[in-house]
Amino acid sequence: MTTIPPIPPDDRDYVTALARGFELLQACGTSEHGQSLADIAKLCGLARATARRFLLTLHALGYVDFDGKLYRLTPKVLLIGNAYLGSMSLPRVARPFLERLCREVKESCSIAVLDGGDIVYVAREQTGRIMSVDLAVGSRLPAFSTAMGRVLLAALDPEERARRIPEQIPALTPKTVTDRQAVLRLLDTIDIQGWCIVDQELELGLRSIAVPLRTAGGQTVGALNVGTQAARVPDDALRGEILPKLQAAAAELRPLLF
């Protein structure tokens, strides 16, 4: 499938007002308690009067709620996300394989796609909570420190990989690889071996393994992972017991993906 590159913000066809509207929607969702006009204007780099007009429009369209002090997203924004998931064949086709894999390994299993420098969960089968945050469909995590993210980054050409990795990688845990060049070298290895293990770089106590999901034509369209508790599942068990099952599931899915 050919991907048309996005137009730059200085292109005459770029609609700045539309872009700002989406920026404000994202800003409204950065706090579960809501955001004030001042906070949203600051997050988006806009004058308060300009931000207020955008917010009033979004409120009139039903995407934002306002209690007189704070702005919050409404359930209507889920129409956008659900429309995306409904248009994707990957979660629908992969669901039976994901459920079976979860039963076989007795661990939480997920499928994610790459969006910029993040991964976005599009399917998940959970056996128990293994992270401090509750992951669900739509959850986002940084690609640089996740097994699925590294698998997906490794499928890109070297220039594109570099564009999606921040110049300064934050230390999410004491085990996070923060050397950017070291991460890029890891991606070269992952590209060759076809799988990735991340050991407590995202969160202490969490160890995960991932493989790419490829179409029959060889295009990587997602990643499949198994997440485990580091204290319970050693590294050699991931490689020796779980990896073959992951690879088998990905191989079975391959002719069904496009």
Image (cartoon, rainbow, N blue to C red):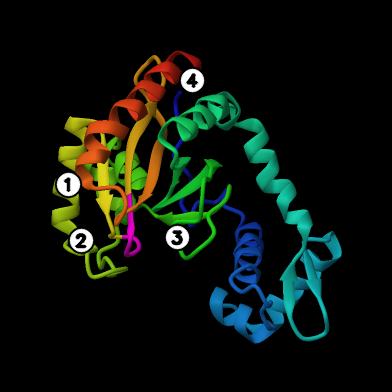
Q: CA distance from mark 3 to mark 1?
A: 24 Å
Residue under label 3, please give it.
Answer: 131
Indicate the quadrant where residue 69 lies. Answer: bottom right
Identify the magenta region. Answer: 202-207
Q: At label 2, which amino acid type do we have?
A: Val
Q: Find the distance from the CA under tag 4 to the CA under tag 3.
A: 30 Å
Q: Residue at x 49, y 48 (%)?
A: 120
The disc at residue 186 is 1
Single out the mark in the foreground, 4 or 3: 3
Furthest-right residue in this view: 60
Mark 1 or mark 4: name the one nearer the start of the chain: 1
**Coordinates of residue 157 in the picture (x, y in percent):** 25, 37
Which element is circle 4 on? loop
Q: Which residue is mark 2?
A: 177
User: Alpha-carbon neighbours of circle 1 within 10 Å: few (<14), some, or many (≥20)?
Assistant: some
Picture coordinates of residue 119, whole percent (x, y): 44, 49
Dot 4 or dot 2, earlier in sequence:
2
The majority secondary structure of the magenta stretch comes to loop
Give the residue displayed 29% in from the left and 57% down from the top: 231
Q: Give the mark, 3 or 1, whose residue is nearer the N terminus.
A: 3
Q: Are marks 3 and 1 in contact (CB under 8 Å)?
A: no
Dot 2 and dot 1 residues touching (CB under 8 Å): yes
Distance of mark 3 from mark 2, alpha carbons?
19 Å
Q: CA distance from mark 1 to mark 4?
A: 27 Å
Q: Are marks 4 and 2 in contact (CB under 8 Å)?
A: no
Do the numbered discs 4 and 3 sit on residues whose CB atoms are within 8 Å?
Answer: no
Between 200 and 40, the one nearer to me in the picture: 200
Q: Amino acid at mark 1?
A: Leu
